[in-house]
Image (cartoon, coloured by chain):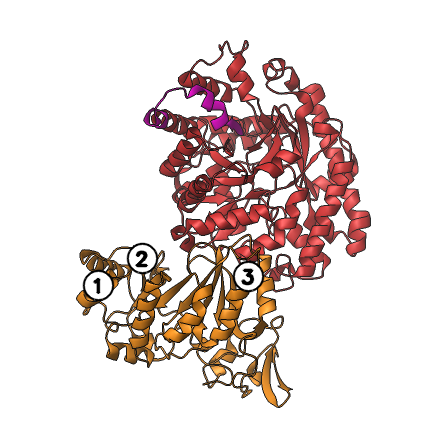
């Protein structure tokens, strides 16, 4: 299709809103420019689908993920936005909503809304529980209706406080896809009954996602971190300038054997991944003028706290290919996720990637390094499993699942999105959900994400969709940007035919029909 | 009854280990299904767990994966099952003239404890089920005792899922290591119970009463089979009995479905959500509290 035809197609689409059309038109405009300059080898690897820039665009003019220091903003106000420091609870909610509209991301909607309980607790003063509940309910609805994107992420916990408890209550009552929610758990700080409230919510609506707070905190510095979008962990007051991911399945297919994979092919494609990372971040940092924005001038973000994310996916297929096992038979006892030797090989691959990523300097990175990330897929992925996950529908029981993957988590500081599928009998037993969660975190899980069968809100990796919306989407579109991604994922990946299941992806490059 | 070619307190015949269950007691549990049952329930959902394999060997030739082999240990015949070759096609189960399964594994206490140890962070406890777990009582006692006396496992609760046929003497021996029992009350009237299970139910009542007195009765389970069980016709007597139980005991209503069922019970009507809710309302009217309903109704899953 020619550019004009694609533009016409978007403009005349019967289901997209005007705003959604503007977004896709902007993507088309950006992608009509030449791609940032890279070598012929890198371009070939990109075109062959071995490395992938997540369709972020040909000329990056904004970082992929931005995590502003909202606490600083609330206390200092903003010259640029003509905002005074927040004086009370209403001020704080209003000020946050104002800034959210000025925080860019790859989706044009902020992916990080802050550690809301910590941010709001200083403004609670003598407000009673009911007043807090009513104000936060309105705020929650406002977020969902005005920033309709399930990648938008709120963090709460690990401390027990009234904001945290009230948001959990509201989130379970409203069952909205947005905002996405991460509950930080720290066994030394978080009381059991608060974790139980969170795991009860998972039984009701598959949210929140539970993050291993001490483990994440150790990966960053005292200024802190946030969980954003599809469970990406990134430095607070910073973010991700870009995400380039490597398809391990393709890397395995280019290898003649396991030794060749580790010694020749994997290092080669990692080098090309770095080349693409450098080219994309150089353009953003040197030519886009993004880092001249008020966010930097007012110290809400710092350029040095942005890192590239080095993503990987297709671990399951890579392991099976290297072991000479057909990926058509994911369920056999010899495959990744099921067989000890297969799991051990997978772990060796994660270790090799960790070795490369922690020792390779980058020009624009937090501590001059990229951050390794087990990438949760995009809606166009076919026959390749997200990150280091076990293929959809072929997961062992939840305990064996946790045991098979726990050791991987230490190597993925920028997040490892795995989803535990549970049948709906667990709804009557939230205690079991809590124990699974505590156990998984104590065995090394960086984050715990569960999907309970037959709930109205289901996970499509990091974000949520409503089952009923998915069914309606093909007829009438959706006011929510991410439903389109999920509908495409459902069509491409057979997600709906599979068991209690989910797939993963984050952004799709094209406009849906 | 079966011969037991091993030391009963040290080894058990296990039909299956389920690393995770959220329906066999409180919280997240590892469940060990022991092979062999002294009931012959017409409606059994796992009829191949009733009898212990007598090594007749009829299944061996039928296995499409050659996963079954005949071996002699001393003078005893055994069928050895290779888990890694097995595709779980269940041909052996349909062939077996004894309605048993060759797919069992003999575990020692040490082997089971190692499995439990590996997942101790993820579970609240273990449940032994069956078959009828109490038929291998010396092993169960030994297993629970080992867990309770191992410092880093002692927090795990030890529960038994039982048909209630164990004698009070037997319960006495298990009591020091037992955290709770889930007991099936398969019918109210003796005749009905005998029709369904081929056994009397007086020991079941004794077990329930005794366990309740020891504060070890976690749950009484009623499996409702329309036109077969007598819970509705005996609702007053049943409710009166259940009302006497401790307030901590859950009354779990289960709905009969056809999954796995063989023989005459295939013709029995499945129990619907409406049936269960009617039974629940009848019990509630008669002041029976702590009723738990099924989370899902398998018959109605399309």
Judged by depth in the image, the label closer to the viewer, 1 or 3, is 3
Quarter of the image where one finds residue A409:
top right
Other residues around mark 2 within 10 Å, as few (<14) / some (14–19) / many (≥20): some
Callout 2 touching callout 1 (CB < 8 Å):
no
- Chain seen in red: A
Image quadrant where residue A91 sits: top left
Residue at the disc numbered 3:
B149
Question: Does the magenta portion include B129?
Answer: no
Of callouts 2 and 3, the N-terminal one: 3
The residue drawn where x is 70% and y is 28% is A366
Q: What is the CA distance from the residue labelled 2 to the residue labelled 1? A: 16 Å
Residue A251, disc:
none
Question: In the image shown, does A44 or A495 lie closer to the viewer?
Answer: A495
| Residue B267 in the image: above or below residue A286 | below
Within 10 Å of the Cα at label 3, are there few (<14), some (14-19), or many (20+) other Cα atoms? few
- Pointer 1 residue: B239
B17 shown above or below A419: below
Q: Position of residue A458 (x, y in %)?
A: 45, 45
Q: Evaluate whether residue B32 shows in this view.
A: yes
Quadrant where the image shows the N terminus of chain B: bottom left
Q: Secondary structure at mark 3?
A: loop
Q: Earlier in the sequence, mark 2 or mark 1?
A: 1
Q: Residue at x 36, y 72 (%)?
A: B164
Instruction: Output the chain of dot 2.
Output: B
Viewer-side residue, A377 vs B186 = B186
Q: Which residue is mark 2?
A: B293
């Amino acid at each position: 299709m020619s550019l004009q035809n694609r533009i016409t197609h978007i403009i005349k689409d019967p289901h997209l809103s005007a705003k959604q059309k503007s977004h896709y038109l902007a993507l088309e405009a950006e992608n009509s420019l030449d791609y940032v300059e890279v070598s012929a080898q890198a371009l070939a690897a990109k075109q062959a689908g071995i490395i992938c820039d997540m369709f972020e665009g040909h000329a990056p003019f904004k970082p992929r993920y931005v995590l502003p220091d909202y606490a600083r903003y609330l206390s200092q106000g903003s010259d640029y936005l003509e905002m005074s420091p927040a004086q009370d609870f209403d001020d704080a909610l209003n000020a946050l909503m104002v800034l959210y509209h000025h925080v860019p991301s790859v989706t044009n909607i902020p992916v990080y809304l802050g550690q809301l309980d910590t941010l709001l607790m200083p403004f609670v003063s003598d407000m009673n529980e009911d007043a807090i509940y009513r104000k936060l309910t309105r705020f929650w609805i406002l977020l969902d209706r005005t920033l309709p994107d399930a990648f938008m992420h709120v963090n709460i916990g690990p401390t027990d406080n009234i904001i945290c408890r009230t948001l959990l209550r509201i989130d379970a009552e409203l069952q909205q896809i947005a905002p996405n929610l991460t509950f930080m758990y720290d066994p030394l700080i978080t009381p059991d009954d608060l974790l139980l409230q969170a795991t009860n919510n998972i039984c009701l609506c598959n949210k929140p996602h539970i993050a291993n707070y001490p483990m994440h905190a150790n990966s960053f510095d005292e200024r802190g971190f946030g969980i954003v979008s599809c469970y990406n962990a990134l430095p607070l007051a910073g973010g991700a300038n870009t995400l380039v991911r490597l398809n391990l399945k393709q890397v395995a297919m280019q290898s003649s054997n396991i030794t060749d994979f580790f010694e020749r092919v994997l290092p080669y494609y990692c080098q090309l991944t770095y080349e693409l990372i450098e080219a994309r971040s150089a353009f953003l940092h040197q030519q886009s003028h993004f880092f001249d924005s008020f966010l930097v001038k007012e110290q809400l973000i710092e350029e040095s706290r942005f890192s590239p994310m080095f993503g990987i996916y297709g671990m399951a297929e890579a392991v099976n290919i290297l072991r000479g096992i057909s990926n058509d038979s994911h369920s056999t006892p010899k495959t990744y996720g099921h067989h000890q030797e297969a799991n051990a090989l997978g772990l060796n691959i994660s270790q090799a990637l960790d070795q490369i990523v922690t020792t390779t300097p980058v020009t624009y990175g937090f501590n001059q390094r990229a951050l390794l990330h087990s990438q949760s897929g995009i809606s166009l992925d076919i026959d390749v499993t997200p990150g280091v996950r076990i293929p959809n529908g072929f997961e062992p029981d939840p305990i064996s699942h946790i045991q098979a993957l726990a050791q991987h988590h230490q190597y993925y500081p920028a997040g490892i999105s795995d989803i535990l599928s549970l049948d709906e009998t667990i709804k009557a037993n939230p205690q079991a959900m809590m124990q699974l969660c505590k156990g998984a975190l104590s065995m090394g899980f960086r984050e715990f994400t569960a999907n309970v069968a037959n709930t109205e809100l289901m996970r499509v990796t990091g974000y949520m969709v409503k089952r009923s919306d998915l069914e309606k989407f093909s007829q009438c579109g959706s006011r929510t940007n991410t439903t389109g991604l999920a509908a495409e994922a459902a069509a491409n990946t057979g997600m709906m035919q599979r068991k209690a299941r989910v797939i993963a992806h984050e952004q799709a490059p094209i406009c849906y029909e | 009854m079966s011969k037991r070619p091993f030391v009963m307190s040290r080894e058990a015949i296990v039909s299956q280990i389920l690393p995770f269950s959220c329906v066999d007691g409180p919280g997240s549990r590892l469940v060990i299904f022991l092979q062999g049952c002294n009931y012959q329930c017409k409606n059994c959902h796992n009829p191949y767990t009733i009898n212990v394999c007598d090594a007749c060997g009829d299944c061996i030739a039928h296995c499409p994966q050659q996963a079954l082999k005949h071996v002699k240990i001393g003078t005893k015949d055994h069928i050895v099952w290779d888990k890694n070759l097995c595709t779980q096609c269940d041909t052996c189960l349909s062939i077996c003239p004894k309605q048993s399964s060759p797919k069992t594994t003999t575990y020692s206490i040490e082997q089971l404890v190692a499995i439990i140890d590996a997942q101790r962070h993820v579970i609240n406890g273990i449940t032994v089920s069956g078959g009828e777990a109490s038929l291998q009582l010396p092993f169960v006692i030994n297993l629970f005792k080992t867990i309770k006396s191992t410092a880093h496992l002692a927090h795990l609760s030890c529960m038994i899922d039982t048909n209630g046929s164990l004698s009070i003497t037997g319960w006495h021996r298990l009591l020091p290591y037992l955290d709770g029992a889930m007991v099936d009350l398969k019918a109210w009237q003796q005749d009905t119970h005998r029709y369904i299970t081929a056994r009397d139910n007086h020991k079941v009542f004794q077990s329930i009463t005794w366990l309740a007195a020891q504060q070890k009765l976690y749950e009484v389970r009623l499996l409702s089979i329309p036109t077969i069980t007598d819970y509705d016709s005996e609702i007053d007597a049943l409710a009166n009995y259940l009302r006497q139980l401790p307030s901590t005991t859950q009354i779990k209503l289960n709905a009969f479905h056809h999954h796995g069922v063989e023989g005459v019970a295939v013709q029995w009507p499945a129990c619907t959500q409406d049936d269960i809710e009617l039974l629940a309302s009848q019990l509630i009217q008669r002041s029976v509290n702590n009723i738990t309903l099924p989370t899902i109704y398998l018959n109605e899953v399309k």
